[in-house]
Image: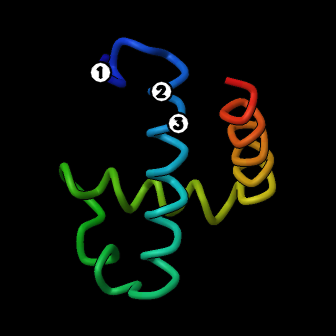
Amino acid sequence: MSALFNFQSLLQVILLLICTCTYIHSSWSALLDNNKTGVRGVFWKFARIGERLSPYVSICCILMAFSQLRS
């Protein structure tokens, strides 16, 4: 089943995108800073969300881990 049709999987994909983009932005900031607009700007926005809301993102990652262990 595709992640688009399962809400929990869609949330996991979005959360993992946020974490991945934040890591890439912290390691290679020039890679995302050049693309702040357009379709590639979505990844820059995910990185910005991860930087500014990092306590909430980490709590969501922990909840996602427990959710996967329960399933």
Q: Is disc 3 placed on a helix, strand or loop?
A: helix
Q: Name the residue: 60% across, 59% down.
A: 50
Q: Quadrant of the N terminus?
A: top left
Q: Amino acid at mark 1?
A: Ser
Find residue 26 and report its horizontal and vertical position in percent: 52, 82
Look at mark 3 in the image and give the residue it sits on: 12
Which of disc 1 and disc 2 is earlier in sequence?
1
Find residue 21 and report its horizontal and vertical position in percent: 44, 64
Left or right of residue 51: residue 18: left
Are circles 2 and 1 on residues that touch, CB within 8 Å? yes
Q: Is disc 1 placed on a helix, strand or loop?
A: loop
Left or right of residue 3: residue 64: right
Left or right of residue 38: residue 67: right
Q: Amino acid at mark 2?
A: Ser
Q: What is the number of the mark on residue 2? A: 1
Q: Amino acid at mark 3?
A: Gln
Are circles 3 and 1 on residues that touch, CB within 8 Å? no
Are circles 3 and 2 on residues that touch, CB within 8 Å? yes
Q: Name the residue: 25% across, 77% down.
A: 34
Which of disc 1 and disc 3 is earlier in sequence?
1
Look at mark 2 in the image and give the residue it sits on: 9
Find residue 41 and report its horizontal and vertical position in percent: 29, 56
Q: Callout 3 environment at 10 Å: few (<14), some (14 to 19), or many (20+)? A: some
Find residue 65 and report its horizontal and vertical position in percent: 71, 42
Q: Callout 1 environment at 10 Å: few (<14), some (14 to 19), or many (20+)? A: few
Hey, which residue is sitting farthest top in the picture? Answer: 5
Q: Quadrant of residue 68?
A: top right
Task: Give the distance between the C-alpha atoms of the residues marked 3 and 2, in whole angstroms.
Answer: 5 Å
